[in-house]
Amino acid sequence: MDKPLSSSSSSKPTTPAKRPSREQAAEAVKTLIAWGGDNPDREGMLDTPNRVLDAYGELFAGYDEDPKEILGKTFKEVSGYDDIVLVKDIPFHTHCEHHMVPFFGHVHIAYLPHDGVVGLSKLVRLTNVFARRFQTQENLTAQIIDAINSNLNPRGAAILIEAEHMCMSMRGVRTPGTTTITQRFTGVFAEEHAYQKRFFAMIDR
């Protein structure tokens, strides 16, 4: 990763912080290990800082990806198809920006084509772009559907995310198995209740 991390809710970071060097980041990991009560210089921990940085490079790779590039190519030869396109049960994992612990679950995305369709795998990739950043579930919901509206200009779009948050399961109220659901509708999905009902029915099949 070459770009700084940011908590911005836009498709690209707008208030980037100066990225520390790898050596500085490794020292920060060692400090956290020591603060947690362990010895960062013992044998089992010696390579932990580098492993953590490598893992962060994967877990937060979304800061280096542009949703416009993912959704930039559409297909118009679809024999006039103009009904709902739904990709459901997209698995995701991300990290809570408040406690930096994971939350994970599934995303369901639907849209009504206006001028062509996008490759189905692109909706999975779009989900991963935003999931591989520090997040809240509300932000993740808004970012995905906003990117679809901005880049595909559909007649309408819908999204529902269901997730379990480790900041509730592992700490705090410690309630494993609790699910949080967020949803958003735009265009025809927001204006016509019948489309919302179809969306929910298709998810439940």
Image (spheres, helix red, strand yellow):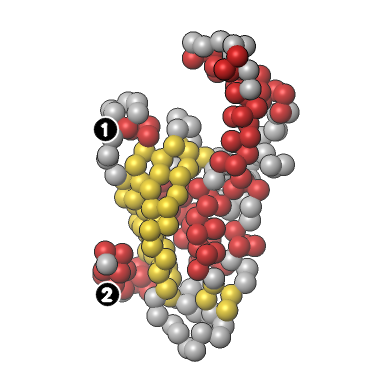
- Badge 2, how many Cα within 10 Å: few under 14, some, many 20+? few
Q: 41 or 156: nearer the eye? A: 41
Check disc 1 and give the amino acid type.
Thr
Residue at left 70%, top 33%? 18
User: In the rendered structure, which disc, 2 or 1, sits on the residue that comes first in sequence?
Assistant: 1
Check disc 2 and give the amino acid type.
Ala
Residue at left 48%, top 38%? 95
Mark 1 sits on what residue? 175
Q: Is residue 181 left or right of residue 60?
A: left
Dot 1 lies on which element?
A: loop
Tell me where residue 93 sits by quadrant: top left
Mark 2 sits on what residue? 194
Q: 38 or 107: nearer the eye? A: 38
The residue positioned farthest toward the front in the image shown: 43
Q: Is residue 176 left or right of residue 129?
A: left
Tell me where residue 195 sits by quadrant: bottom left
Position in image of residue 73 (x %, y %): 62, 72
Position in image of residue 180 (x %, y %): 31, 45
Tell me where residue 107 sits by quadrant: bottom left
Instruction: Give the vertical position of 195 relative to 137 (above or below).
Output: below
| Gap between marks 2 and 1 measured at Cα | 35 Å
Q: Quadrant of the C terminus?
A: bottom left
Residue at left 59%, top 48%? 62
Q: 115 or 125: nearer the eye? A: 125
Residue at left 32%, top 32%? 169
Position in image of residue 31 (x %, y %): 59, 15
User: Is residue 72 something that shows in the picture?
Assistant: yes
Instruction: Give the vertical position of 59 relative to 33 (above or below).
Output: below
Position in image of residue 111 (x %, y %): 43, 71
- Badge 1, how many Cα within 10 Å: few under 14, some, many 20+? some
Q: 135 or 188: nearer the eye? A: 135
